[in-house]
Amino acid sequence: MATLAALSSLIFLCLSQLPYYSSAVNRTLGSSLSSATDNNSSWLSPSGEFAFGFRQLNNSDLFLLAIWFNKIPERTIVWFANGDSPAPRGSTLELTTKGLVLNNPGGQMLWNASASPASATVTEAAMLDTGNFVLTGSGSDFVWESFRNPTDTILPTQTLDLGSMLFSKLTATNFSKGRFELHFDNGNVQLNPVAWPSRSIYNSYYSSGTSSIISSESGNKLVFNATGNIYIVKTNGEIAQLSPWVTITPRVDRYYRATLDSDGVFTQYAYQNNSPTNQSWWALRILPENMCTAIFNEIGSGACGFNSYCSIQNGRPSCNCPPGYVFVDPSNRLMGCRPNFRQGCGGDDGSRDPRELYEIREFNNVNWPLGDYERLEPYSQKDCEQSCIYDCSCAVAIYDGSTRCWKKKLPLSNGRYGETEGYSRVLFKVRKGDSSSGFEDNSGSRRREPILLGALLLGGSVFFNAILLVAISLVVFMWHKREAGNNAQDSSVSDTNMPCFTYKELEEATDGFKEELGRGSFGIVYKGDLRSGSRNAIAVKKLDKLVQEREREFKTELSAIGRTHHKNLVQLLGFCDEGVHRLLVYEFMSNGTLANFLFAIPKPDWYLRVRIALEIAKGLVYLHEECNIPIIHCDIKPQNILLDQHFIAKISDFGLSKLLISNQSRTFTMARGTRGYVAPEWFKNVPVTAKVDVYSFGVLLLEIICCRRSVEMECEEENRAILTDWACECYVERRLDVLVDGDETSMADKARLHKWLMIAIWCIQEDPSKRPTMKMVMQMLEGLLEVPQPPSFPSSSFSVSVEY
Ligand SMILES: *[C@@H]1O[C@H](CO)[C@@H](O)[C@H](O)[C@H]1NC(C)=O
Ligand SMILES: *[C@@H]1O[C@H](CO)[C@@H](O)[C@H](O)[C@H]1NC(C)=O
Ligand SMILES: *[C@@H]1O[C@H](CO)[C@@H](O)[C@H](O)[C@H]1NC(C)=O
Ligand SMILES: *[C@@H]1O[C@H](CO)[C@@H](O)[C@H](O)[C@H]1NC(C)=O
Ligand SMILES: *[C@@H]1O[C@H](CO)[C@@H](O)[C@H](O)[C@H]1NC(C)=O
Ligand SMILES: *[C@@H]1O[C@H](CO)[C@@H](O)[C@H](O)[C@H]1NC(C)=O
Ligand SMILES: *[C@@H]1O[C@H](CO)[C@@H](O)[C@H](O)[C@H]1NC(C)=O
Ligand SMILES: *[C@@H]1O[C@H](CO)[C@@H](O)[C@H](O)[C@H]1NC(C)=O
């Protein structure tokens, strides 16, 4: 009993002491704060939970008058006064009978807070433990409250009356008014984009739908209650949720705040109180759920700025530029993109053909729903591209994959990623050779006129060039010799202008087909020497004797590779087509196949592997997009990548490849390729596209990263047998070290390793339309295009269930 009495007297003592402590916190008239000496002079709330005062902006000599959570390391700002006019060092805040006045050192007013009603006299100011900073009048009522003058954030116990608004900051670090506002008007909570830098607003991208013509059923207050729920209270007292939000379990062990973020997403954040491990805010819930698609206005730029596109990454909108475009303001991606070249058509004086100046870049999976100004039909893709290139107004053409061509002009608005219909292709007109545009272009569509010789010579080292020169002159010589009196030749073959050898010549060159180099699709490859000169090594592929069935492969390979000229493709030097003998003659690659190189012990150097991966990608970009007739290789695997004496990678073996004649973008064909590398759609009776090579490249990239085969049946751990599955698993579990098996050089290059793994996972997406094009892959590998988070696991263990 005695103890109880003692305890209650202690409590009484504490309570009676409270006013004393509080008065130490409350500020009387004439109190002031200065940003002159201290970098963050502030007034604290009684428990020290919140602080009101100056905050230094980004280590500059500028200050923000703000309220912040003072007990968490981040000191998160929840209210601020002078975002548009930061206060220089030496500015002062003074409490007067009329309110608060913030003056710069010269005595000019930067900001003020006036008591309301205007007749009221201020006696005190207090920072309360709720986060509300208040001015009290003589009747101890509040004549000004930060809760009634919110900026971008609301806190538990705060309510918003009709007519209230929040505005987003411009960026995370710039407190100027940004591009989005929340309005509580007419009973409705709505989010609006702003016509920045003016404050006029566009149609909302979110609405709570709580407005009603029956006034008692209309929203009256927006409440953020003490235990974390946010809801609307109607005039009749009923509660309505901010749909699709629902009531959450009340919690007192968390800090909460709800902020209209600078990206326009209204987010309720939570922070675990007194948790030593989890010291950060996390987003509990957001409005709207998908910012990228929520905004759709005829005018204004949409969720991101003009000419950019929005994609959701980790639940948040992220803005990016299409190829050939750069951010207007790299420190604020919401400001949109601009072309990194002069938009137009002909040359400055109209004297040059637009085709010399502009080219088309395909950039799929992105949609700008507005801005069409013409629809042409029926048009082929080629016509569509031409039409855009010749049209000064055209910035982008959309081709629907069969007959329709839409042209769009700048600026592009409401761009969003991944919302595309069917097979439509987005064709960007960009200026040739602009620096931002991406990969270095070795040859191809740009200009075929410069002679092959020149192009090839530029592409290699002196030594390599010397060999090539000899080889080519020899071939040309022989070709001319042969042309004089040649025998019957297949017409389809002859139109490739390929030198033709006699069987006897090749038999001699290979010393009777003695030294076997390897086995390709449908044939054995032998080493040989042209004219006994040891420097003129060649590789001769002798196709199997099943002539009838192999006829087509022979022609395919000949016509496919015969048309190509690229540093990263094996060069075909000639052929032989004599009765049953069908042979193909290539340049000799002294360092064998990538398979031999890659799966050796110790692992080959990481940076050499990196270069080789880039070279293979370049070769594929050329095949898909830059040669006259696009070619799908259909059998990309390490056995079909050869390395020359400088370890330059070259794609070989075109026996299975498909020519996409007359602007096809896809083709029906029988299943082909090699198990472990073939894309799932081969087995689905759907048309295949160049994306099958992207898939195989993804597998190959994983092999290059890990230095192991795509399928390893003798694996000790079963989950590692299929490389694609295992790599995804490692990625999700963030175990890159396990994936590269302790390869130190690649671990030291972790950023690239991580990015390339993401690229590989993009490439092996089961849905071909989700895979990037080789051009995008190339740009991502080179760091010119950002790599978004891969969407999900590609279908797991597809490769084991299929027997091919
Ligand atoms: C300090 O100000 C707050 C808010 O006006 C008030 O509740 C409290 O009683 C004040 N304390 C004193 C000692 O005046
Ligand atoms: C200002 O606040 C920061 C934390 O935001 C703190 O680290 C620093 O010591 C403070 N400076 C002064 C002079 O109080
Ligand atoms: C305040 O910040 C400035 C610049 O960031 C620094 O030079 C100065 O030492 C700081 N003053 C105090 C009291 O921390
Ligand atoms: C704040 O500024 C307005 C106009 O700029 C002025 O009318 C008002 O009196 C000022 N209030 C205080 C407390 O100085
Ligand atoms: C903050 O400072 C950093 C470097 O000091 C600078 O790069 C950045 O642009 C600054 N941010 C703002 C908003 O001024
Ligand atoms: C914030 O952005 C605005 C508009 O771009 C700019 O005028 C202002 O200087 C920026 N403020 C700071 C502190 O960087
Ligand atoms: C906050 O709202 C929720 C749901 O309406 C309710 O369960 C809870 O009791 C409220 N908390 C307070 C402190 O009013
Ligand atoms: C902190 O905890 C919450 C819930 O307990 C969780 O959702 C959040 O992801 C955690 N954050 C971190 C960084 O662990």
Image (cartoon, rainbow, N blue to C red):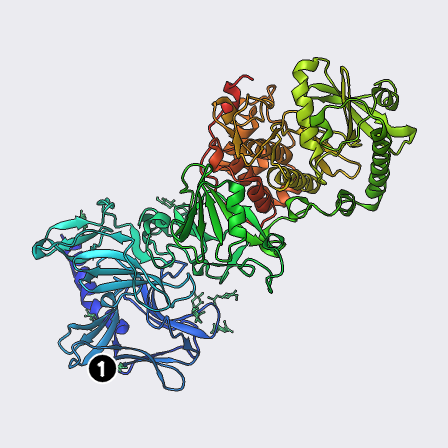
Find numbered disc 1 in the image and state the secondary structure of the residue it sits on: loop
Residue pushed farthest right?
Answer: 532
- The residue at the point 86 percent across, 31 percent down is 478
Instruction: Pick the residue in front: 588 or 39.
Output: 588
Q: Position of residue 672 (x, y in %)?
A: 58, 22
Residue 59 horizontal/vertical position (percent): 48, 69
Residue drawn at the location 90% of the way across and 29% of the way down: 531
- Is 391 drawn above or below residue 201 in the view shown? above
* Residue 595 visible in the snapshot: no
Q: Nearer the viewer, residue 144 or 468?
A: 468
The residue at 50%/37% (across/down) is 771
For disc 1, the neighbor class at 10 Å (few under 14, some 14 to 19, many from 20) is many
Q: Which residue is at the front of the view, 315 or 572?
A: 572
Name the quadrant of the C terminus. Answer: top right
Total marks placed: 1
Q: Residue furthest bottom?
A: 106
